[in-house]
Amino acid sequence: MDTEATRTLVKQFLAARSAGDLAGITAALADDAVWVLPQSSSFGPFEGRDAVAKALGGGVSGTLFDPATIRRDIHKMVVEGDTAMVQQRLSATTLKGAEYVNEYCWVYTCRDGKIARLEEYADTLHAGRVFGTVS
């Protein structure tokens, strides 16, 4: 895909994700989409459009956060060809009432007008401390 098509697709996907629009999330994903999370997280990888869409549409975050409190602030998006990198901050209140703020970098690889691969990078040590899974 060319740079502008990738930029448009990823922006549409991010808007759908922020709106909790499961149909929009699903429509942006390739049939064989893969979401790869940090190895030290306790989630994923998720494979296939439906599994990825369900996980991104609240299947993962719904087990961790009060959905009404989730906020994603995009700092920067860099796009070249079929790849987009997005730096963002996620803030939310955990289901146990703790405040969570973490920086993320997502790398999206697009193919034939769809997102084929999502790679997530975050500070999982910080996340584990907030969730109480590490000290």
Image: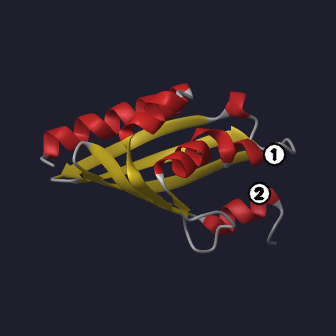
Q: Position of residue 3 (x, y in %)?
A: 15, 46
The residue that mark 2 highlights is 130
Q: Residue at x 63, y 41 (%)?
A: 91
Q: Position of residue 52 (x, y in %)?
A: 53, 50
Q: Element type at marker 1?
A: loop
Q: Position of residue 112 (x, y in %)?
A: 22, 47
Q: Residue at x 57, y 51 (%)?
A: 51
Q: Label 1 sits on what residue type?
A: Ala
Q: Position of residue 24 (x, y in %)?
A: 44, 29
Left or right, 38 with reference to 68: left
Q: Which residue is the extreme one toward the left?
A: 2
Left or right, 59 with reference to 8: right
The residue that mark 1 highlights is 98
Q: Residue at x 76, y 35 (%)?
A: 66
Q: Quadrant of residue 15?
A: top left
Q: Are marks 2 and 1 in contact (CB under 8 Å)?
A: yes
